[in-house]
Image (cartoon, rainbow, N blue to C red):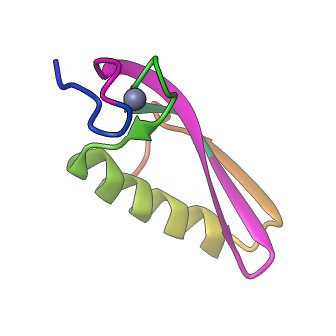
Amino acid sequence: MIRCDVCDNGERVSATRSRIAERDGRTAVVLGVPVEECPACGLTWLTMDVAKQLDVLFDQLLASGAELAQAHWDAPRAA
Ligand SMILES: [Zn+2]
């Protein structure tokens, strides 16, 4: 377990949360993203690996042209 270095009051736990990105008036939402969360202050962290994959996914969603694009982290997708 990793102690929260922000509030120093809790230990980070695994959780799933939705993440949102906005660009050029478009919004992309990814549901069920694995994160680490501090139960004390509510801050969340992404691992490097998840952050990289999320960037790619957001790029794909925002490039789709839809005003609001949504995907689930666990949904099948191109790597
Ligand atoms: Zn904290």
Between 32 and 47, the one nearer to me in the picture:
47
Residues in magenta, as a range:
8-29
Side (left or right) of 8 relative to 55: left
User: Where ligand 1 lies, by image quadrant?
Assistant: top left
Q: Is residue 22 a member of the stretch shown in magenta? A: yes
Q: Residue at x 43, y 47 (%)?
A: 77
Looking at the picture, does residue 27 appear above or below residue 29? below
Looking at the picture, does residue 58 appear above or below residue 45? below
Task: Name, please, the residue furthest toward the left.
Answer: 1
Give the quarter of the image for residue 5.
Answer: top left
Classified by dominant secondary structure, the portion drawn in magenta counts as strand
Find residue 18 and report its horizontal and vertical position in percent.
59, 36
Find residue 34 and report its horizontal and vertical position in percent.
39, 30
Q: Residue at x 34, y 53 (%)?
A: 51
Q: Residue at x 28, y 18 (%)?
A: 11
Quadrant holding the N terminus: top left
| Residue 4 is at least partly visible in this image | yes
| Residue 31 is at least partly visible in this image | no
Between 18 and 13, the one nearer to me in the picture:
13
Between 39 and 59, the one nearer to me in the picture:
39
Q: Residue at x 22, y 51 (%)?
A: 48
Find residue 68 and report its horizontal and vertical position in percent.
80, 58
Q: Is residue 43 a member of the stretch shown in magenta? A: no
User: What number of labels is visible?
Assistant: 0
Task: Name, please, the residue furthest toward the bottom.
Answer: 24
